[in-house]
Amino acid sequence: MAMKIIKHMLNYQLDKTFAALADPTRRAMVERLVQGPATVSELARPLPMSLPAAMLHLKVLEECGLVTSEKVGRVRTCRVDPKMLSQAEQWVADRRRMWERNLDRLGAFLDETKPENEE
């Protein structure tokens, strides 16, 4: 039962992560933060939106665990949290391996069932 709860919580967190990354503005913010920490103003500057709108996007990224921020004085600095990014990457990699195995088996099956005159 406990394992089922943990799996559900991880899936819920991944759902929130992929939903956050579905937005191009948030993906751009994450791409920028992968290069290193940035202030909210630095993240908002290249975006075609107001600072409050950019802050709403950052809030979504923080809520799903992709980004952390720290406020020192009047400046809020954001960073990518590699843990959640790694979990999303692992989920995608697991699915890729599964499909590669399935396609390899399909290829082997097709090779075995190929008529003699096609070889």
Image: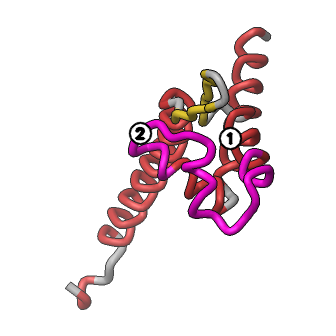
- Contact, CB < 8 Å: mark 2 with mark 1? no
| Residue 39 falls within the magenta-colored stretch | yes
Q: Looking at this view, is 87 or 61 the one in front?
A: 61
- Image quadrant where residue 107 sits: bottom left
Q: Amino acid at mark 2?
A: Gly
The magenta region covers 31-55
**Label annotation for residue 53:** none
| Residue 89 falls within the magenta-colored stretch | no
- Image quadrant where residue 55 sits: top right
Residue 13: x and y, percent? 71, 32
SS state under label 1: helix
Q: Nearer the viewer, mark 2 or mark 1?
A: 2
Residue picked out by circle 2:
36
Mark 1 neighbour density, 10 Å: few (under 14) some (14–19) many (20 or more):
many
Residue picked out by circle 1:
61
Residue 114: x and y, percent? 32, 78
Q: Looking at this view, is 103 or 82 the one in front?
A: 82
SS state under label 2: loop
